[in-house]
Amino acid sequence: MVDLSFIKKRKKKRIIAIVGLLCFGGVVVVSAIALLGQQAAPMTVRLANSGVSLALYKSEFDNEKKSFLLAAEAKPYSEISEPALRAYEGALDIDDSKPIENSDGKAYQFYQYTFYLTNTGEVAADYTFTLNVSYPHKSSFDLADVLRVRFYENDGNNKQSHNFRTFAKHSNQYDQDKGWLPEHISDSSSGYCENFVNQSEVVTSKVAAFQPGALMRYTIVMWVEGDDPQATGKAPTDAGIALGVNISAHETEETPQE
């Protein structure tokens, strides 16, 4: 088990993003399946083809083509600050890396999920990749307010490419000219996130002319940011959160010649 003792602890507040259940004065972890049923999986990936043959793979060495992927066992999340997350950067955007757990193994510091998308057909495809936040069970506390999502989209054949973007819900600060201002990635000294598209949609990415044999590597990392200004008060006792990917693909439309 990785030593997580260097992660900053807060004495005056603590947030646990509930996928299971927090209650009874202390922290009691109950199976997420018991609370949320089959919808408790922290990540789902769905692929819909129309006239093309794209396929999902859990790793580049997987031989079984899929149109649906379901993430591993769900657990609660304990807060983490983004600087502590950087210690794991080398292991985030790779095959089969595992979510980092607390020392007792009952909660995640963050969740990571990597998968591949490839064109197994004979024609080029255009596709739209949409990442959404879902709420298997809601409470008056919106867990998405303190959520951070790191989105990696890279050529699957390039082992050295690890480009990413970081997203969060907009802050509570409004500028008359700029609109809702973005959240910091972590504390006020850090850079800024990109805003979610809306309350439930994190990001949409459109890829054109995805050629036969092409391979794309996707990684989604999500965590509860302990330095978010809204990460205060008691943790909710009846809320869950998960992410869902929807990929819709169709044959590339030919560009008319002038």
Image (cartoon, rainbow, N blue to C red):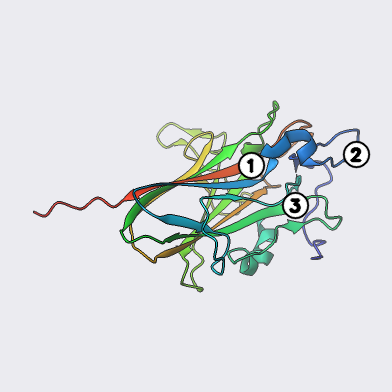
Between circles 3 and 2, the one closer to the viewer is 3
Q: Which residue is at the far right?
A: 25
Q: Which amino acid, mark 1?
A: Ala
On the rendered structure, is 81 left or right of 55? right
Of mark 1 and mark 3, the one earlier in the sequence is 3
Determine whether label 3 and label 2 are within 8 Å by CB: no
Between circles 2 and 1, the one closer to the viewer is 1
Of mark 3 and mark 2, the one earlier in the sequence is 2
Q: Nearer the viewer, residue 190 or 78?
A: 78
Q: Which mark is residue 108?
A: 3
Residue at image position (79%, 32%) is 237
Q: Label 3's element?
A: strand
Determine whether label 1 and label 3 are within 8 Å by CB: no
Q: What is the x, y in percent for residue 247? A: 45, 47
Quarter of the figure that contains the C terminus? bottom left
On the rendered structure, is 240 left or right of 169? right
Q: Label 1 to label 3, Cα distance in Å?
A: 13 Å
Q: Label 1's element?
A: strand
The residue carrying mark 1 is: 242
The residue carrying mark 2 is: 26
Q: Nearer the viewer, residue 236 or 118?
A: 118
